[in-house]
Image (cartoon, helix red, strand yellow):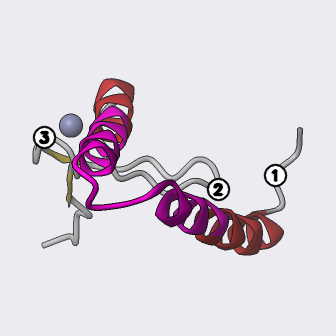
Amino acid sequence: MTNVDQFSCRWCGQSFAPRLNGGTEKLHCRVQCRHEHREGRVAIAEALEQSGKISIKDEHVALSEKRERQARHSKHANRAG
Ligand SMILES: [Zn+2]
């Protein structure tokens, strides 16, 4: 038996075989799922912000932490363009 790397789409749960032809890891079965996942994250952040559960400051912190992670990651991947 060969070990087939089947991944589950983070968004819709569908299993797929990721093609690792670049530096980016694939978490979604298709581009649409990636976009919808991102939209969903924005939507919940908006809802939390409107209900007062998080503040703009929390979003600043989250964004700067995300950028730090990306900077660390891109230093490793070193993509052209
Ligand atoms: Zn999907």
Q: Which residue is mark 2?
A: 23
Mark 3 or mark 2, whichever is nearer to me: 3
The image shows residue 63 at horizontal and vertical percentages of 59, 59
Of the four image quadrants, the one with ligand 1 is top left
Q: Which residue is mark 3?
A: 12
How many neighbours does mark 3 have within 10 angstroms: few (below 14), some (14-19), or many (20 or more)? some
Query: In the depicted view, which residue is nearer to us: 73 or 5?
Result: 73
**Numbered disc 3: secondary structure:** loop
**Circle count:** 3
Residue 57 is a magenta residue: yes
Q: Residues in magenta? A: 39-64
Label pair 2/1, CB-CB below 8 angstroms: yes
- 31 horizontally vs 2: left or right: right
Mark positioned earlier in the residue sequence (3 or 2): 3
Residue 75 is a magenta residue: no
**Numbered disc 1: secondary structure:** loop
> From the Cβ of disc 3, is ligand 1 less than 8 Å away?
yes
The image shows residue 15 at horizontal and vertical percentages of 14, 48
Label pair 1/3, CB-CB below 8 angstroms: no
Mark positioned earlier in the residue sequence (1 or 3): 3
Q: Which residue is mark 1?
A: 79
Q: Amino acid at mark 1?
A: Arg
Identify the main secondary structure in magenta: helix
